[in-house]
Image (cartoon, grey):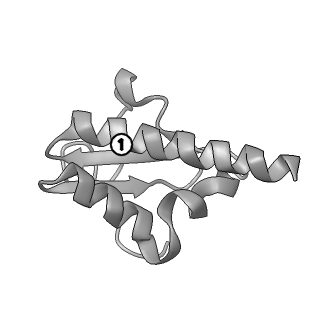
Amino acid sequence: SKGCPLRTLDGSAGVVQQVPADEEDLVVPPDQVGLFIGRGGENIKEMREKIGGDIFIGVHQATRPGAPQRIQIVGDNREKAKEIVREKLLEIKTRAKGREKE
């Protein structure tokens, strides 16, 4: 696969550990991954700046074609990070629904 592997919840590279219950909703539909990441990763960078501290936000590849992709957050200020990621997910879902109506 491209790029570096996403870190596991313990911060090491490798197989991803079980998803914590409070992060089960941190998924993005495959057709909205680009909107979530942004051009050149600008949305990820913007979220990291808002959160502050040493934070990693990554999107895992889908477990099967067409399946939602899980968002992983590792580092400082995880609670704030989850809140900001959820806001971005809501924003892109709202934007996507608006495009469907056009």
Q: Residue furthest top?
A: 21
- Asked whether residue 14 appears in the rendered view, the answer is yes
Residue drawn at point x = 48 percent, y = 63 percent: 37
Nearer to me, 54 or 7: 54
Residue drawn at point x = 70 percent, y = 56 percent: 31
Q: In the drawing, does residue 63 fall left or right of residue 40?
A: right
Q: In the drawing, does residue 69 fall left or right of residue 50?
A: right
Above or below, comparing residue 75 to residue 33 in the picture:
above
- Asked whether residue 13 appears in the rendered view, the answer is no
Counting from the top left corner in percent of width and height, residue 72 is at: 37, 46
Above or below, comparing residue 51 to residue 78 in the picture:
below
Counting from the top left corner in percent of width and height, residue 85 is at: 40, 44
Counting from the top left corner in percent of width and height, residue 25 is at: 49, 30
Q: Element type at marker 1?
A: helix
Disc 1: CA contacts within 10 A as few (<14), some (14-19) or many (>=20): some
Residue drawn at point x = 40 percent, y = 75 percent: 3
Q: In the drawing, does residue 54 fall left or right of residue 13?
A: left
Counting from the top left corner in percent of width and height, residue 92 is at: 59, 49
Name the amino acid, label 1. Ile
Nearer to me, 67 or 13: 67
Residue 57, quarter of the rendered image: bottom left
Q: Which residue is mark 1?
A: 84
